[in-house]
Image (tube, grey):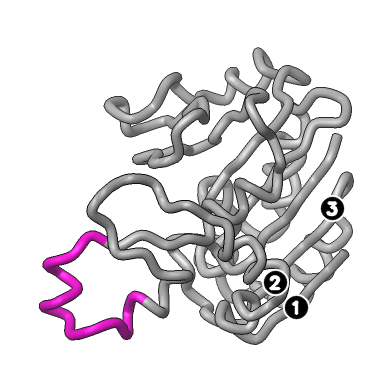
Amino acid sequence: MIERYDTYTDYCATPAYQQWLGQWEPPVGDISWVDHEPEWYYSGTPRHRMQERHGTRLAYHLLDTLEMGPRDCVDIGCGHNPHPGLWGVDPHNERHRDELLTPEWYTHNWGQWAHAFTCNAIHFCDQDTIVHNIAKVRGILRPGGTAVITINRARIRDFTGPDYDPERLYHTLGQTPGITRMVWMDEPQEAAMDGNTWIWIRQ
């Protein structure tokens, strides 16, 4: 249920990811695809990277683990959402969202969604509050509904301050109600694109 890897590269070398990669069809568009953020950092010179559009495959991989097919999926904190077929809710990014995300949104959507996806959107809090934010995501799921949540631990560290304890966070997240799987990458510490902790939950 809990998997711990040194780096993204170690995760991307797993048979499960490699099998997914072998059948993945990238979205149409002029984008240079890489598996993960650090791979982009070290691809070519900075000037070369500036002249290309890059995307990481990991978010698509994580979405596909939901096996949601045509069923309803909400993207909480969608930002500039590149994933077709998701209903995007966000407190900002009016041009790219489908609906405004407010505290009341969770109440109105309680128990309503078959699937939820949230990528680096609910981690702007201290390490005690993150458990409550995950519980809100689980709360909007229908019975049997599933969600995948990515977290960038650097933001939790920032909001927690000197009391931040990554090992305590590791054990707390591993006991999340409804959890079916957790993937924790020790590195990178800063993972702004795809997060360095991924949590799968079921209602």
* Left or right, residue 139 beside residue 29: right
Upstream in sequence: badge 2 or badge 1: 1
Q: How crowded is mark 1: few (under 14 residues within 10 Å), some or many (20 or more)?
A: some
Q: Which residue is drawn at 29% across and 82% down?
A: 43
Question: Which residue is label 2 attached to?
Answer: 184
* Extreme-front residue of the structure: 23
Q: What residue type is labelled 2?
A: Trp
Measured as percent of width and height from the top left, residue 28 is found at: 33, 45
Cβ atoms at labels 2 and 1 below 8 Å apart: yes
Q: Earlier in the sequence, mark 3 or mark 2?
A: 3
Residue bearing mark 3: 176
**What are the residue bounds of the magenta stretch?**
40-53
Label 2 secondary element:
strand
Q: Nearer the viewer, residue 81 or 168?
A: 81
Quadrant into which the N terminus falls:
bottom right
> What's the amino acid at mark 3?
Thr
Q: Position of residue 53 (x, y in %)?
A: 23, 60
Q: In this view, does 31 lie above or below 165?
A: above
Along the line of sight, which residue is nearer the eye, 113 or 127?
Answer: 113
